[in-house]
Amino acid sequence: MRRAHKDVGMCMERVYKERIDEVIFDIVYHFNIALDFEKIIEWGIKAGERCIKIYAPNEAVAHYKLALNAIDTRHNIKVKKERIAHILSKLGELSWITGEWDAGIKYNERLISLSTKEGDTKSVAEAQYRLAMIFIGRSRYDEAIEALEKSLRTFTDEGDIVRAADCHRGIGKVFRKKGQLDEALESYSIGVGLAERAADENLLGRLYNDMGVLYVFKENYDLAEEHFKMSIDILEKTSDQFELCRAYNNIGSFYLKTKEYETALGYFKEQIIPTKKIGDKNNEGFSYVNAAEAMTNLGGKENLVQAEEYCKKGLQIFEMLGEKHMIAASYASFAIIYHKLQDWNRAIKHFEKSIEIMKDADLPYYIAELQLEFGLMYGDKGDEYKAINQISKAQVIWQELGNKERVEEAKTVLMDLRMAMNKS
C-alpha cells in the first residue's frame, strides 16, 4: 500500500514536471500516505508556497505543518537548519493571518532559539518583528516595543531600510493605540521616508493606510481620505489582498467618523466575503464589528437586530485571537445597540465590561471614547449626575493625552448637561 503510493508520487513528479502546480497537492498526499518523510518535507514546503500564491493561508499552514511534523518525527533525517528556519518563518507569518496567534508565538520563539544558535541575526529580527505584531494585537505594548526596537537595531545595522521602515510602522501602531498621536505620526513619517528611499510601493501603500487611520483619530478628515485613497491605489496595483481588505475597512471607518453611515456600511459588508475567502480572521472580525457600528448609527429595529448578530460574530473571532482591544470594542458596540433600544441594564453592563477590558489593555484614548458614549447614554436615560461623572473622566484623559479638540467637545457636552440639571 505505502509502496504503491510512493510509486504514484514519484511518477507524478516525472510526468508533470513542467506543470507541477496541477498535481502538487496530490503529490503531497501520496508521499504522506507512503510515510516518505524526506518527500513530505520537500513537497510540503512546495505546496505551502503554492498556497500562499493563491491566497489560501489555512491550507498553506497545513502543508508547512506537515513538513515540520515530518522533521520533528524523524530525527534521523538530516535537514538543513536553513530549511527548518524557512518553515518556522512561514508558519510564524501565516499564523498572524489565520488567527492562530498562540501557535504563532511558539513558531517565532522556536525560530529565535534556532537562529540565535546559528548566528542568523536577520532571522531573529524577522521573528521578533512578527512577535511584536501579535503583542500589539493582544495589547502587550511594552513587549511589542521591546521586540520592535531589537528588530530595528538589527535591520539598521544590516542596511535593510525596508524592514527598518516596517519596524517604525509597528512602533507607530503602538503609539496610536495608546493615544500618543504625534509620536505615531513621527514614526510613520520616518517609515514613509525609508520606504520612498527603497522605492517599495507596497510598503508605502501599507504606511499610507496606517497614516489614514491616524488622521481619522486626529480628526483631520481631508488628510485621512487622501491617504486612504493613495493607499488603495497602490495596493490595487501591487495586489496585496490582505492589506487591501484592511484599507477598505479603514476607509469605511473614515465614513463612520464623517457620519456617512450608508457608505461606511457598504465598505464593511463588501469585505466580509473577501476576508473569509482569503482566511484573514482579523479583518473578518473588523468587518463584522464595524458593520454593526454603522447599522447601529443608521438605527431602526431591523438594523439593530442585524447589528447584534454581527457583533456576536465579531466577538467570537476576537475572543479566539485574544485581541483585547477589539473584544472591548465588540462589547462597546453591544452597549450602544442596547442604548438605542433603551435596554438600560444591558447597556450599562456592556459599557462597564468594555471599559474594564480597555483599562486592562491600557488604551486610554479608547477608554475616553467609551466614557463619553457611556455618559451620553446616562444623559438619554435622564441621569445627568452619572452622565457628568463619565464625561468628566473622559475629559481628564483627553487632557492628559493633550487632545485639545476632544477636551473642548467634552466641555460643551458637560455644559449642556449641567444646564439640563439646573432646569430640572
Image: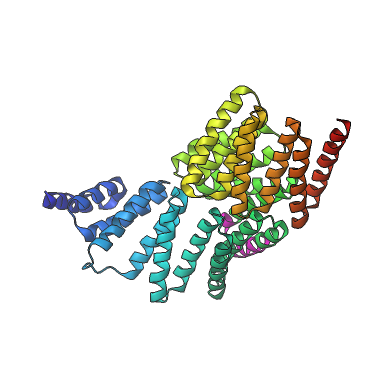
Left or right, residue 187 beside residue 38: right
Nearer the observer, 178 or 92: 178
Front one among 309 and 193: 309
Give the vertical position of 96 relative to 157 (above or below).
above
Q: Nearer the viewer, residue 281 or 324?
A: 324
Res. 293 in view: no
How many numbered discs, if any? 0
Query: Which residue is found at the position 19% from the left and 51% from the top?
Result: 9
Q: Where the C terminus falls, by quadrant?
A: top right
Q: Is residue 407 left or right of residue 282?
A: right
Magenta-highlighted residues: 189-203
Q: Is residue 168 above or below residue 333?
A: below
Q: Where's residue 145, x and y in %? A: 58, 64
Dominant SS of magenta comes to helix
Q: Residue at x 74, y 48 (%)?
A: 394
Is residue 305 visible from the viewing direction of this image?
Answer: yes
Would you say residue 199 sits in the magenta stretch?
A: yes
- On the image, the x and y values in percent for residue 46 come to 32, 55
The spot of residue 183 in percent (x, y) is: 70, 61
Colouring mode (rainbow / by chain / secondary structure / one colour): rainbow
In the foreground, 179 or 2: 179
Q: Is residue 296 left or right of residue 59?
A: right
